[in-house]
Image (cartoon, rainbow, N blue to C red):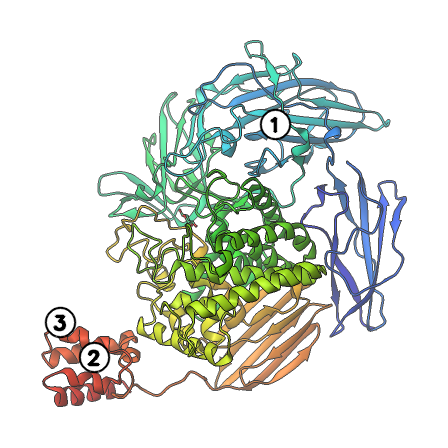
């Protein structure tokens, strides 16, 4: 008999199931089994309370569901503690062992659970500028016999809490960033071990954060959510004798407040800390706070309080310096070898009152710190020493996007051990890995991961360094499939989408450019950005199998498309109003990133159809036939209007540019199969025309390779991917990039920073191609929500001899790994239990498989292989291969073709056979001969 175990039970979105945010969390489990093709036919769930008493038993449920199964018992109540276990029946007739029990503890589900009130210091502040951070403290007595203790805590602004001299938990940037006035998350900590019988002390430091710090570009705004920082804390202590006690923030004399060493804190500008002003022992009992002020309560709607849906932000990785050097102007520059978001932890010894200054930047320009792209973000931390022993310090309420730090006024010699970079982001579970035989592609993929890590700091942001760091909707719209492969972003994005819907409601149905919205409710909505409202829920449904997200977001999805309808009117073409369009098309001037080759109206009208279609699909899933009908009509009308306006009968696009074709293909906007193929062929011609360089921006780039491949142009997609000259995905890699850049040439060839004022080196949007890499090179694609069914169809190309894609799906690990050696293609596949897969080999062979490990080995011929170039190949093909281009250019030298204009004309004939293009030359016969010989020499 084969053994089957229910391996892991997961309470929705929470790795530790502590402080659960809902009274009905959904349950998922994965199964480990030796039997191949394992499918579930039934399950049983049991829940026990902490005394071992049964809280619920489902009995055997005939069902094949193992992901996000609805809570089967009576709703949970605040603070409830349970243990849950599951076992399953397989189609093979076997019953698994019971899983290990997973414990669950519910947070505070209702406002009435809180007796604490928000408190703030009584002193006055000038909130037109940054103020010193308040320190709040209180002491309290506990009796003997403490059984357990929980701290429920949040703040207006950011907080760091301490109990009896120790920092509580390992979260940073709590409570994160949401639309605070409607959703303010609190955190739950188990603090049992931090308390003792007798006197105890509690305290918290508050920071400006997003709540009242300066946020937004062009000087931004302060006090967006309010002017007062405040703390809400409720410590609940249970005694062994069954009694309990609460210590809460209130306006009693017990709570005292003072400023301290944090003189200034700003997400953009940095932190200024004077260690001479520290209150040593301020969260130990007995500390003398007689000079401290009192506190007062702040009104805040406690109905806004909720437990987090996703993981907290933590310090995730420590990185040591790779070098410390002197810049040409004599500055000390530390290179950490990796562009990241976070801060420095320093160890310093020196005289009292001495100040060390740390300036952060992503790049060097001519050997000096390149701070111009930071615009109005000062990105500078200052630490003033208390003197004496070695002092360690790191900031609390700021973060920087940096690889380099300029260290000024370090006392004595600076050693690498004195500085550590701390990478900080939401502590998401890593679920995706990808590698190939090509080192540059692997580095590109690494860069995508690091740009995701740099920009998933509680909110999905555009960039982590300049005066922006906002939840730009368009960036996430294109990146969400990639993000969903690399990390479990389901809870993180569920939270963000909840805010999106709120902000959309506040903006009368329009989806703001950034969520949370700090740009005001009057801004218009832009295509591809606002469409995050429809695209992201659909991606989450596809990748995580979460049907509820569609139900939750459905109103927002429809409200958004209804807005488009009002913009487009009867014409069903969205060709009016503000648009970003195919943002940062490389042909756009540095200072005009919206001036793309593809008409903005094409982008907008294409997204109209796409979003309406997504609603049709979502309505079908939700069984909402009325909505399905309504949006089907709209989608059809908009699709017909698009074709009428922008597609020629033969399949050319009005607006003969890559993004226009890619959109029409990817969003299925071409009425006939012939037009679609013609569009694909033309797209491939344009790509060849560009010499296999990128000519697309945020909108076109993520879908280019898919559009090429789905019309049969794999070779073109691979050539585009493998291009190393600018603009291309690999150009930054060849320049030593460790993250994805905002612009194709954020760093120019000559080592100077792109003069455009919007130039970041850490923007994930253009890295959205990774999703195509996972699906096409790796070959792993979900074909039913949550990878319940998947397709393994690797399509090798570009000379790659190996690739591997691995993904922890909601059902468990799926893997596709291939090698080409000695004319053989070997494929190893791993399919998780309770799923099925269609495997398609490069030779077209198809197999249906279930769970387990599978292997294939078949003869292989490179389908894109071509013979050596000849004089009858197209000029564009010849000139797009850098090796051949060099040979041709030196042959022109030998032919003494010096007339630049003529040469440009000739080489511009990209779609002409090279032999014919050469006819323009006076010595054409000789030219044909010399070039033939030159090409021949390449064989
Ligand atoms: C951001 C982008 C964003 C854009 C809007 C920029 O400043 O950094 O990534 O999507 O504005 O077009």
Q: Is the shortest distance between ligand 1 and the CB of mark 2 under 8 Å?
A: no
Quarter of the picture containing the N terminus is: bottom right
Label 2 sits on a secondary structure element that is helix
- Of the image marks 2 and 1, the number of the one nearer the N terminus: 1
Mark in the foreground, 3 or 1: 3
- Which residue is depicted at the point 51% across and 28% down? 207
Front residue (pair 906, 521): 521
- Where residue 63 sits, quadrant-wise, is bottom right
Above or below, comparing residue 672 to residue 616 in the picture: below
Tag shown at residue 452: none
- Label 3 vs 1, first from the N-terminus: 1
Q: Specify the farthest residue to the top.
A: 290
* Residue 807 in the image: above or below residue 2: above
Which quadrant of the view contains residue 175?
top right
Q: Where residue 817 sits in the image (x, y, percent)?
A: 56, 73
Find disc 1 in the rendering and name its residue: 162
> Which numbered disc covers residue 888?
2
Q: Secondary structure at mark 3?
A: helix
140 on left or right of 432: right
Q: Position of residue 789 (x, y in %)?
A: 67, 70
Question: In the depicted view, which residue is nearer to us: 846 or 70?
Answer: 70
Real-space Cα distance between discs 3 and 2? 15 Å
């Amino acid at each position: 008999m084969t053994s089957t175990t229910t391996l892991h039970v997961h309470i929705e979105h929470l790795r530790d199931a502590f402080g659960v945010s809902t009274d009905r969390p959904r349950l998922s489990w994965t199964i480990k089994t030796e039997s191949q093709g394992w499918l579930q036919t039934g399950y049983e769930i049991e829940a026990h309370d902490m005394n071992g008493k049964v809280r619920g038993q489902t009995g055997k449920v005939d069902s094949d569901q193992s992901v996000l199964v609805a809570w089967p018992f009576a709703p949970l109540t605040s603070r409830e503690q349970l243990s849950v276990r599951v076992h399953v029946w397989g189609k093979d007739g076997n019953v698994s062992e019971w899983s290990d029990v997973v414990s669950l503890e519910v947070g505070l589900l209702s406002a009435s659970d809180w007796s604490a009130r928000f408190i703030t210091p009584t002193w006055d502040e000038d909130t037109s500028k940054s103020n010193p951070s308040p320190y709040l403290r209180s002491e309290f007595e506990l009796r003997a016999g403490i059984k357990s203790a929980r701290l429920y805590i949040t703040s207006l602004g950011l907080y760091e809490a301490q109990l009896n001299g120790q920092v509580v938990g390992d979260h940073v940037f709590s409570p994160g960033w949401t639309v605070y006035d409607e959703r303010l998350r609190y955190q739950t900590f188990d603090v049992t071990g931090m308390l003792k019988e007798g006197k105890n002390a509690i305290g918290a430091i508050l920071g400006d954060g997003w709540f009242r710090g300066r946020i937004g570009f062009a000087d931004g705004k302060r006090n967006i959510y309010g002017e007062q920082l405040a703390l809400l804390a409720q410590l609940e202590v249970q005694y062994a004798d069954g009694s309990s006690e609460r210590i809460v923030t209130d306006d009693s004399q017990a709570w005292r407040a003072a400023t301290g060493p944090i003189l200034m804190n700003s997400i953009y500008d940095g932190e200024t800390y004077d260690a001479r002003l520290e209150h040593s022992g301020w969260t130990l009992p007995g500390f003398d706070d007689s000079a401290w002020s009192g506190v007062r309560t702040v009104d805040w709607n406690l109905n806004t309080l909720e437990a987090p849906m996703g993981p907290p932000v933590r310090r995730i990785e420590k990185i040591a310096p790779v070098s410390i050097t002197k810049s040409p102007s004599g500055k000390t520059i530390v290179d950490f070898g990796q562009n990241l978001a976070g801060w420095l932890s320093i160890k310093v010894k020196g005289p009292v009152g001495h100040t060390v200054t740390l300036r952060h930047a992503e790049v060097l320009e001519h050997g000096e710190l390149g701070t111009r792209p930071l615009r109005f973000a000062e990105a500078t931390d200052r630490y003033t020493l208390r003197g004496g022993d070695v002092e360690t310090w790191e900031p609390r309420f700021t973060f920087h996007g940096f690889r380099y730090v300029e260290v000024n006024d370090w006392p004595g010699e600076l050693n690498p051990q004195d500085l550590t970079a701390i990478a900080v982001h939401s502590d998401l579970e890593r679920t995706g890995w990808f590698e190939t035989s090509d080192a540059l592609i692997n580095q590109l993929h690494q860069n995508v991961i690091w740009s995701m890590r740099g920009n998933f700091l509680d909110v999905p942001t555009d960039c982590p360094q300049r005066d922006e760091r906002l939840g730009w909707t368009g960036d996430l719209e294109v990146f969400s499939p990639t993000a969903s492969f690399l990390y479990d972003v389901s809870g993180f994005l569920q939270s963000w989408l909840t805010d999106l819907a709120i902000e959309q409601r506040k903006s009368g149905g329009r989806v703001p450019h950034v969520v949370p919205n700090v740009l005001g409710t009057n801004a218009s909505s832009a295509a591809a950005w606002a469409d995050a409202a429809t695209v992201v829920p659909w991606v989450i449904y596809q990748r995580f199998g979460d049907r509820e997200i569609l139900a939750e977001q459905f109103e927002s999805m429809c409200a958004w498309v209804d807005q488009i309808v009002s913009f487009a009117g009867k014409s069903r073409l969205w060709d009016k109003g503000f648009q970003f369009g195919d943002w940062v098309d490389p042909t756009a001037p540095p200072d005009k990133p919206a001036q793309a080759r593809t008409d903005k109206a094409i982008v907008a009208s294409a997204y109209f159809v796409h979003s309406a279609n997504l609603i049709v699909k979502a309505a079908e899933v939700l069984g909402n036939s009325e909505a399905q009908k309504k949006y089907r009509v709209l989608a059809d009308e908009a699709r017909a209007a698009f074709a009428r306006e922008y597609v020629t009968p033969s399949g050319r696009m009005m607006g003969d540019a890559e993004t226009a074709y890619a959109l029409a293909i990817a969003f299925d906007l071409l009425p006939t199969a012939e037009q679609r193929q013609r569009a694909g062929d033309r797209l491939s011609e344009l790509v060849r025309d560009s010499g296999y360089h990128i000519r697309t921006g945020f909108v076109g780039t993520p879908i280019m390779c898919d559009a090429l491949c789905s019309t049969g142009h794999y070779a073109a997609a691979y050539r585009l991917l493998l291009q190393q000259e600018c603009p291309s995905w690999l150009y930054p890699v060849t320049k030593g990039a460790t993250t994805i850049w905002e612009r194709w040439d954020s760093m120019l060839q000559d080592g100077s920073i792109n003069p455009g004022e919007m130039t970041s080196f850490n923007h994930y949007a253009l890295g959205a191609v990774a999703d195509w890499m996972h699906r096409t090179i790796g070959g792993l694609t979900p074909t039913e929500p949550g990878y319940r069914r998947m397709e393994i169809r690797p399509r090798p190309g570009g000379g790659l001899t190996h690739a591997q894609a691995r993904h922890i799906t909601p059902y468990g690990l799926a893997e596709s790994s291939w090698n080409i050696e000695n004319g053989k293609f070997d494929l190893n596949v791993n399919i998780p239990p309770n799923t099925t897969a269609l495997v398609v080999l490069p030779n077209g062979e198809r197999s249906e498989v279930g769970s387990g490990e599978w292997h294939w080995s078949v003869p292989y011929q490179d389908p894109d292989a071509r013979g050596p170039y000849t004089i009858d190949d197209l000029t564009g093909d010849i000139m797009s291969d850098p090796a051949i281009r060099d040979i041709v250019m030196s042959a022109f030298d030998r032919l003494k073709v010096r007339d630049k204009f003529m040469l440009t004309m000739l080489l511009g004939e990209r779609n002409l056979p090279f032999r014919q293009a050469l006819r323009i030359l006076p010595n054409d016969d000789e030219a044909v001969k010399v070039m033939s010989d030159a090409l021949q020499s390449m064989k």
